[in-house]
Image (cartoon, grey):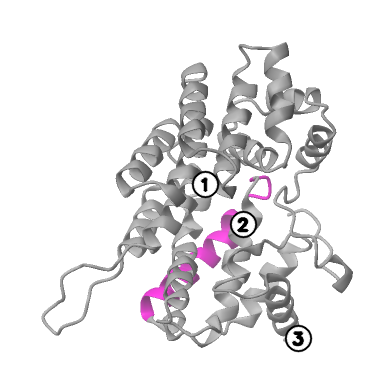
Amino acid sequence: MPPLLPLLTPQDTDAFDDALDDAELAAARTALAQGRWQAVRSLLLHTGDDWDRRGHRVTVLAREPHAAPWVHGWLRAEPASADAATLLALALVQRALRGDEAPDRAREACRAAAALTPADPTPWLGLLRLERTMGPHRQVLRAFAEVRGRHPEHHHAHHLLTARLAERRQDQPRGAHGARGAHEVYDFAERCAAEAPADSPLAVLPAVALAERYRVLAAAGLAPADPATWGHWYRARARRVLEAAFDWWLEWEHDDHPRRHVDLNHLAFAMSCAGRPAEAAALFRRIGRHATPAPWSYPHRDPREAFGRARAHALAF
């Protein structure tokens, strides 16, 4: 294992950077903000077909406010560039999600990019991000299937579908004693974890499902505003899920996965809420400076305050 990263200090609480620990990505994003798209071109060229890393990098670059106009310049210089077309598509998705772009134009751009690079799941990831918020369920599932058909363990895509499924009404039939079955998001996440290879980060997906379902219930007033007082964390299924996810992390942690800090934050959140400070402390030490807004913001909390309080509590033990 690499040396532990330094913990956030009070002065670092604005360090919620979606580039996480990818220094090359952060440098390319800075260059793109200045109109120097050549650095992005080089970054994506060297990323190759590491699909999780490519999806992470393109998604983060696309969030740069002026990404779209700068990428238009890139396309004028290299009209056949699949990398430029993919980044433009995801930048238009980001604009559509902000209400600054027509969703249909973003959809068309994603499909055009996909035609230029048929093996790449990233244009479909962009479409999945759009449909997860704006599209009907059938379109969400279609986009997810396109991503998964190209990369079955796509980390970001599984998180997006988990969040969308968590928002669906629970309409399973009641059992003999009037109790509803488990919500579909739990079954989906556990099935994905079970079907993935032993070293796959999708082992943490069931813990993500717990956090996403809590978000939905709390927003609807059906779960307490303080996640630590939600009794679901202590039920048998949740205990089993958290133990399995933590055990996976101890044995298989991928310290080179581009989105591993997303998993670490979800797992630390769940362990904190479940009253397991020793496990949470180990995770906070591994997170170091790389806190993520979700799930600490659930349901409507200040993520910096929530993260800092949970971390201080865990590290006091």
Q: Secondary structure at mark 3?
A: loop
Which of pointers 3 and 2 lies earlier in the amino acid sequence?
2
Q: Residue furthest left?
A: 176
Give how far across and how far down residue 20 sits, in percent. 72, 51
Q: Which residue type carries mark 3? A: Ala
Q: Secondary structure at mark 1?
A: helix
Q: Say whether residue 270 is left or right of residue 305.
A: left
Query: In the image, what residue type sits under mark 2?
Result: Val
Q: Depth check: 134 or 208 in front?
A: 134
Which quadrant of the view contains residue 178? bottom left
Give residue 99's position: percent from left, percent from top.
Answer: 56, 47
Reading the image, the residue beneath label 2 is 262
Q: CA distance from mark 1 to mark 3?
A: 32 Å
Report how far apart the C-alphas of labels 2 and 1 lie in the structure.
Answer: 10 Å
Q: Residue at x 73, y 23 (%)?
A: 41
For the residue carrying disc 1, how many other residues have a C-alpha within 10 Å: few (<14), some (14-19), or many (20+)? many
**Residue 155, labelled with which disc?**
1
Residue 264 to residue 279: above or below: above
The residue depicted at 64 percent of the width and 75 percent of the height is: 280
Q: Position of residue 308 (x, y in %)?
A: 74, 76
Q: Is residue 171 left or right of residue 69?
A: left
Q: Is label 2 in contact with label 1 (beta carbons under 8 Å)?
A: yes
Looking at the image, is 28 positioned above or below residue 180?
Answer: above
Q: Identify the residue position indicated by label 3 in the image.
A: 316
Front of the two marks 3 and 2: 2
Residue 46 drawn above or below residue 179: above
Note whether 164 is above or below 232 in the view shown: above
| Proximity of marks 1 and 3: CB atoms separated by less than 8 Å | no
Q: Residue at x 72, y 42 (%)?
A: 65
Q: Where, quadrant-wise, is the C terminus in this rendering?
A: bottom right
